[in-house]
Image: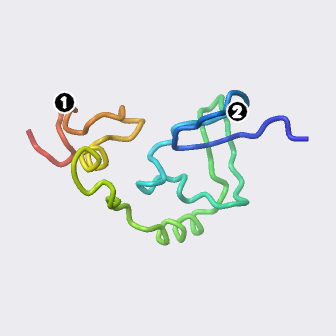
Amino acid sequence: GVKDMVRISDARMSGTAFGTIVLHITPESAVGGPLALVQTGDMICLDVSKRRIDLLVDEVELTLRQKALPKPSTPDWASRGYAHLFHETITQADEGCDFDFMRREGPAGLKR
């Protein structure tokens, strides 16, 4: 039987204590990251020594999939308050998961 299976995720993973895991892929699929383009049956090459993950699907198909993705939007539950602040201003994992206005240069597009 299967002894190990690679798991690739852009989210929290609970209950997994063994095996090969690539966790916190950024940017997240919810904001249009490349993980959103993966479909059942796609082949993925994981090269740990080169720190690479490659989706083995041709560029034409990936472009079609990208165009078919819904545009990222603020969900109803995050229309106000702390949820809205979090959804609109927290950066992706590769940028520190911090408020964008806490960066030295300030929020994206805002000149200081």
Task: Give the residue type at disc 1.
Answer: Arg
On the image, the x and y values in percent for residue 19 come to: 73, 31
Judged from this view, the residue extending furthest toward the left is 112
Closest to the observer: 6 or 88? Answer: 88
On the image, the x and y values in percent for residue 84 come to: 26, 50
Please tell me the numbered disc located at residue 61: none
Front disc: 1 or 2: 2
* Residue at image coords 41%, 54%: 31
107 relative to 29, above or below: above
Label 2, on which residue?
Answer: 20
Mark 1 Cα shell of 10 Å, populated few (<14), some (14-19), many (≥20): few
Indicate the quadrant where residue 82 lies. Answer: top left
* Residue at image coords 30%, 34%: 98
The alpha-carbon separation of the residues under discs 1 and 2 comes to 36 Å
Please tell me the numbered disc located at residue 104: 1
Report whether 57 appears left or right of 77.
right
Report whether 46 appears left or right of 84.
right
**Which is more N-terminal, label 2 or label 1?**
2
Task: Give the residue type at disc 2.
Answer: Thr
Closest to the observer: 35 or 50? Answer: 35
* Residue at image coords 71%, 40%: 6
Mark 2 Cα shell of 10 Å, populated few (<14), some (14-19), many (≥20): few
Residues marked 1 and 2 touching at CB (< 8 Å): no
